[in-house]
Amino acid sequence: MTTSTQTQTETVCWDIVTRAAAMAAKAHIGQTRRDGSPYFAHPARVAALLAWAGGNERLIAAGFLHDVIEDGPTDYDDILEACGVDVADWVALMTKDMRMREDVREPAYIDQLKQGAWQARAIKLADQIDNWQDGLSDQASLPKRLEKAQWAIAIAKGDTGPVSAALRERLQAMIAGY
């Protein structure tokens, strides 16, 4: 039997996922993927992958929000207010500093993920799984997608928790044939 305190805690925990999904849907409204599909489908699939791997509600929420700072007007403080410090910090780790030149930005982003929380690397693995699946029909982008998938696996290789391990193994299995 569940006590009313447990029910309230569970409701509050899942409420963060609902808030994050709504925030991501609003942030990505009108945006599309290369294939013309609504962009929101991507963060929704990333969140679903994190849930599949056993991520908690905060990690699932961060999966929904992983692109919102980079792709729109949402900022760290918006996420902090809606979802708390953990989610805001993990999303910030997933955000490239677009003020930098690309040749500086990409290595800085990789270092940021390497040095950051394992949750950000788990989100990156889920992001790469979805990008890999989404781009299978685009053979021209295969080398670049393969490179990104391999570096995501490499930066998460030291993460031994079950969420990261499940996502890393799934991405490794997906790229094994290429």
Image (cartoon, rainbow, N blue to C red):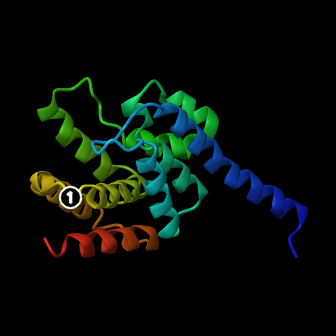
Quadrant that contains the C terminus = bottom left
Classify residue 68 by image quadrant.
Answer: top left
Residue 174's place in the image compared with 97, above or below, is below
Residue 48's place in the image compared with 23, above or below, is below
Residue carrying label 1: 137
Asked whether 169 or 42 is in front, the reply is 42
Where residue 73 appears, x then y in whole percent?
45, 24
In the image, is 62 to the left or to the right of 42? Answer: right
Residue 169's place in the image compared with 91, above or below, is below
Where residue 160 appears, x then y in whole percent?
38, 72
Residue at far front of view: 36
Quadrant that contains the N terminus = bottom right
Where residue 57 appears, x then y in whole percent?
60, 57
In the image, is 86 to the left or to the right of 141? Answer: right
In the image, is 146 to the left or to the right of 46? Answer: left
Amino acid type, label 1: Ser
Asked whether 45 or 81 is in front, the reply is 45
Please give the name of the residue rendered at 38% of the width and 59% of the height, measured from the top-left corner.
126
Helix, strand or loop at label 1? It is loop
In the image, is 36 to the left or to the right of 55? Answer: left
| Mark count | 1
Please give the name of the residue rendered at 25% of the width and 64% of the height, measured from the top-left corner.
153
